[in-house]
Amino acid sequence: MSTKTNKLVTLDEYIIQAQNRFPGATGELSQLLRDIGLAAKIISREVNKAGITNLLGVDGSTNFHGESVKKLDLFADQQLISALDRSLITCMVISEENDGIVRLNSQGGKYIVYLDPLDGSSNIDVNVSIGSIFSIYVREARFDPKLEESDALQPGIRQVAAGYVLYGSSTIMCYTTGIGVSAFTLDPSIGEFILSEDKFKIPDHGRIYSINEGSYNSWDLGLKNYIKYCQEEDDETGRPYSARYIGSMVADIHRTLVKGGIFIYPSSRRYPNGKLRLMYECNPLSFIIEQAGGIATDGSTRIMEIQPKAIHERTPIYVGSKQNVEKAMEYLEKYDEVSA
Ligand code: AHG
Ligand code: MN
Ligand code: MN
């Protein structure tokens, strides 16, 4: 019998090992990822005892998007921003919870970080998975003392790292620096994120479609027909596909990453440009999905190639397994031609 044990690799060890593979690396990005990991542990702890510590429920205010703010939204926002402020390498943060840019102490810092501190807020009070999302850019005009919103308007292809933390049945942190996707599971007994998946790959095809069908009546014909295709019977492609929709994008994307399939948040009458935010929801999760071998598009343009015009702008999104997203695009194109 072998006595060999698998060595557990912590998030911090993994980040340092990855950094050592790049001799010129300054270690700043590694520090930033570790800071986010630390904030994630604190948020995870509070999420798990939110009912006991009176952190459930609304804060009583609405944010500038007009959405009701939950206490955990604010808690997560504060934890992440103060973690990023501590190591003086981030010059600015853009968060869903703040209307304008947040300039940090180190305005000469190298990195710009976008945050959705708590994704899936409406699921907080019902004990359903929620998450945090981050997206990291390098500030281009690094030594210009004036730090403006325009510094942050970079397309997703310029992300140097991105990821999410999912507070689910376990807490998982998943990130990419552009060389594959790694996932870590929080072991609460030792308070460490442990490597659980290196080089995450999304299946090329999956049997799940994920969309809020309540808006069916206001979809375009191409999308209506694609969803009908998902529901038809066909043994070869394993249809009808199953419908799954959690309502926390992080959780829906994590399932899509593991099992394959497609996640869609389209334009509708209520949300003509889609609901989800380009910079702190769609770009980082598209970077993860692409790095795992999948596709993310707004219906015609690759999400990560969209040139942002505003920090809080929205976009429709079709994201997931290659074959599923390609099939959806076939339907959009076909019915676009018909209606032209
Ligand atoms: P947030 O809680 O950060 O505002 O995000 C909620 C988002 C996203 O997580 C989810 O995919 C979507 O809202 C669900 O919207 P619908 O309820 O319109 O389906
Ligand atoms: Mn969100
Ligand atoms: Mn949010």
Image (spheres, rainbow, N blue to C red):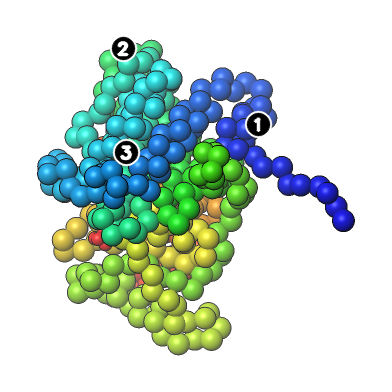
- Name the amino acid type tagged 3: Ala
The answer to the question of whether label 3 and label 1 lie on touching residues, with beta carbons closer than 8 A, is no
- Name the amino acid type tagged 1: Gln
Mark 3 residue CB less than 8 A from any atom of ligand 3: no
* Crowd class of label 2 (few under 14; some 14 to 19; many from 20; radius 10 Å): few
SS class of the residue under badge 1? helix
The label shown at residue 76 is 3
Q: How many marks?
A: 3
Q: Residue at x 19, y 74 (%)?
A: 217
Q: Residue at x 59, y 23 (%)?
A: 25
Query: Is residue 179 found left or right of 326 in the rendered image?
Result: right
Quarter of the image with the C terminus in it: bottom left
- Name the amino acid type tagged 2: Pro
Mark 1 residue CB less than 8 A from any atom of ligand 2: no
The label shown at residue 333 is none
> Residue 169: where, in percent of width, then height?
45, 57
Q: Residue at x 36, y 22 (%)?
A: 85
Residue 108 in view of the camera:
yes
Q: Mark 3 vs mark 1: which is more N-terminal?
A: 1
Nearer mark to the viewer, of 1 and 2: 1
> What residue did someone put label 1 on?
17
Query: Is residue 73 found left or right of 255 in the rendered image?
Result: left
> What residue did someone put label 2 on?
145
Looking at the image, is 43 positioned above or below residue 113? below
Query: Is residue 10 found left or right of 154 in the rendered image?
Result: right
Q: Residue furthest right?
A: 1
Label 1 – label 2 distance at C-alpha: 34 Å
